[in-house]
Amino acid sequence: MLLLAIIYLAFISLGLPDSLVGAGWPVMHEDLGVPVSFAGGVTFIIAVGTIVSSLASERLTRRFGAGVVTAVSVAMTAAALLGFSTATQFWMLCLWAVPYGLGAGAVDAALNNYVALHYSARHMNWLHSFWGVGASISPFVMSLALSADGDWSAAYRGIGLLQIGLAAVLLASLPLWRRVAAIHPGESTTEDEGAEMNEAAGAGGAAGDAAGHVSIRTALRIPGVPSVLLAFFAYCAFEQTAMLWGATFFVADRGFDASTAASFGALFILGLTAGRFLSGFFADRVGDRMLIRGGFLLGAIGAAIVALPLGQVSFVGFALAGIGAAPVYPAVIHSTPANFGRANSQAIIGIQMAAAYTGTTIMPPLFGIISGRVGLWLLPFYLLALALLGLAMTERLNRLPRRSA
């Protein structure tokens, strides 16, 4: 339980930096003397780093253990945030975005797999709810820094120092990680798990090398993996597109004023955070599959309500979409060991993280390009298509036998 409390703090830490760039960019781009559109360059570098480290997470975690990978990754993001606070030119932000992305992807994959192996579904939901707490706190930290003396770097410095403190706690807790892994084995590859990997890989070839490594190519040949990757891609694209374009949609298509639209757009994030907290109370009884199915269905219904010409009532659909989407991410992650085997879970979760970051990197800008030609009215239909795609892929996965109980 002590380790679980530390992991909860780590999930808050995961969310803390995620909103800083967006919250501070209106002032940052002026101080750095670059156009407002340059924010995309920073976020793109971070996204590439997260994809690379997610794909490498299986090797790193198998070699060093989840505790070491988590502690070092948090230390890397802390160093990057402190580097952001010292940046006086745009290229410096781009430079520090590299360790930021590499650290964020590795810790995300390692932590998610560790929780999926050793803790229940309710904790997975609550942990991701705590990520939302962290993501909600950082804009207020930036707002406080800007209102105090207009110094955006103070927000990065403060969050960076918090991350350093957490990295120290994680390093001190390394014996706890080993103790929990010993009580609930699942990180190392035993002979039985090696046989399980070979069975999961099927006729496609051996599951890994002598050290138990599961290659990306081998993981992709496991039945059901392509389906879950496409479902995860669709879900994360759904989430990020709604968060990025929601307020703009309510202004440009529904004619609301900017302050009202901002509050309506925030309903999705609030629904996401509250939904994950509430899901934790019944996740173990309902099961991951029902949570995923119900989440995609409710997300689709919410998007359909937004599409209807209901005036201000359409914001209810946006909140409903957030609540529906809430359990999907943690449930997909938590079900990975049961669907594909414990020995394969770290490799597959790493690829899932890469698919997630690819979806959040590509699909929101793609909607921006399409809506620039068609119109922002397309947003609810775009979200509906993503929700239905995710539902179809997870139902396809559900028809396959699970690899381990």
Image (spheres, rainbow, N blue to C red):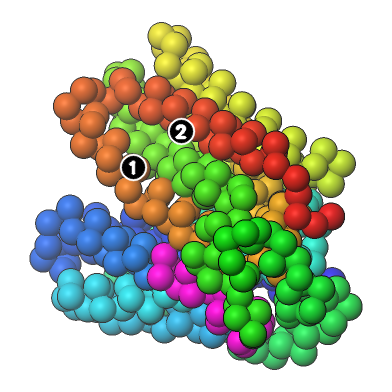
Q: Would you say 254 lies left or right of 89 here?
A: right
Regarding residue 150, the answer to whether it shows in the image is no
- How far across and down, in percent of the image, does residue 238 sit? 46, 38
Choose the circle earlier in sequence order: 2 or 1: 1
* Dot 2 amino acid type: Leu
- How far across and down, in percent of the image, does residue 268 sit? 51, 36
* Dot 1 amino acid type: Pro
Q: Are marks 2 and 1 in contact (CB under 8 Å)?
A: no
Closer-to-camera residue (87/222): 222
Residue 109 lies in quadrant: bottom right
Image position of 405 with respect to 269: above or below: below
Q: Which quarter of the image is occupied by the N terminus?
A: bottom right
Indicate which disc residue 364 carries.
Answer: 1
Distance between the alpha carbons at the discs numbered 2 and 1: 12 Å
Magenta segment includes 118: no
Magenta segment boundaries in residue numbering? 50-67
- How far across and down, in percent of the image, does residue 378 sit? 32, 23
Image position of 301 with respect to 391: above or below: above
Residue 85 lies in quadrant: bottom left
